[in-house]
Image (spheres, rainbow, N blue to C red):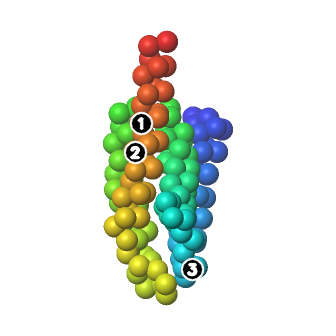
Amino acid sequence: MKSDQTKTYRFLFYFWLVIIFILTSYPTLPPLHDKLVSFDKIGHFVIYSILAFFYMKKEQRNNISETFKKVLLLAIFLPIIDELHQIPIPGRDFSFLDIIADYCEFLMIIIIFKIKSRKNNYS
């Protein structure tokens, strides 16, 4: 039987996925750029880090190596699907840089969870 915490993270993962789809379905606002940092990439970083975190937490009771494989597949396909669905939306386009940014956030969360799981195994 799944724990309440796992169910909560499962709900949060799917809820956040819907939020991402809704947010990326709006026509783009004028970009906010700083001289050094693109706020668009910061947005990608935050949004996809949260999604990856929810996914890892919902899968935390499963085999950790299988979970890493699943999240890597998710990290590959989800950003591509997200970018493809933006093509017909006015002011939006397909961006390889966004895909790379999204993938990096997934990798960051995977690395954090991998380090945490190693520490827990050696404790």
Packing grade of label 1 (10 A; few <14, some 14-19, many >=20) is few
Packing grade of label 3 (10 A; few <14, some 14-19, many >=20) is few
Q: Are marks 3 and 2 in contact (CB under 8 Å)?
A: no
Q: Are marks 1 and 2 in contact (CB under 8 Å)?
A: yes
Name the side, left or right, on which 52 lies relative to 87. right
Identity of the residue furthest to the front in this view: 35
Is residue 62 visible in the rendered image? The answer is no
Q: Are marks 3 and 1 in contact (CB under 8 Å)?
A: no
The disc placed on residue 38 is: none
The disc placed on residue 30 is: 3
* x and y percentages locating residue 80 in the rendered image: 36, 66
User: Is residue 107 positioned above or below 19 on the image?
Assistant: above
Q: Nearer the viewer, mark 3 or mark 2?
A: 3
Q: What's under tag 2, amino acid-wise? A: Leu
Considering depth in this image, is 44 or 13 the residue closer to the camera? 44
Q: Quadrant of the N terminus?
A: top right
Q: Element at badge 2?
A: helix
Q: What's under tag 1, amino acid-wise? A: Ile
Give the alpha-carbon distance from disc 3 to disc 2, as whole Å.
Answer: 29 Å
* x and y percentages locating residue 29 in the rendered image: 58, 79
Give the alpha-carbon distance from disc 3 to disc 1, as whole Å.
Answer: 34 Å
User: Is residue 8 positioned above or below 60 on the image?
Assistant: below
Q: Quadrant of residue 67?
A: top left
Callout count:
3
Q: What's under tag 3, amino acid-wise? A: Pro
Q: Element at badge 1?
A: helix
Is residue 35 visible in the rendered image? The answer is yes
Residue matched to label 2: 107
Name the side, left or right, on which 53 lies relative to 100. right
Name the side, left or right, on which 77 lies relative to 8. left
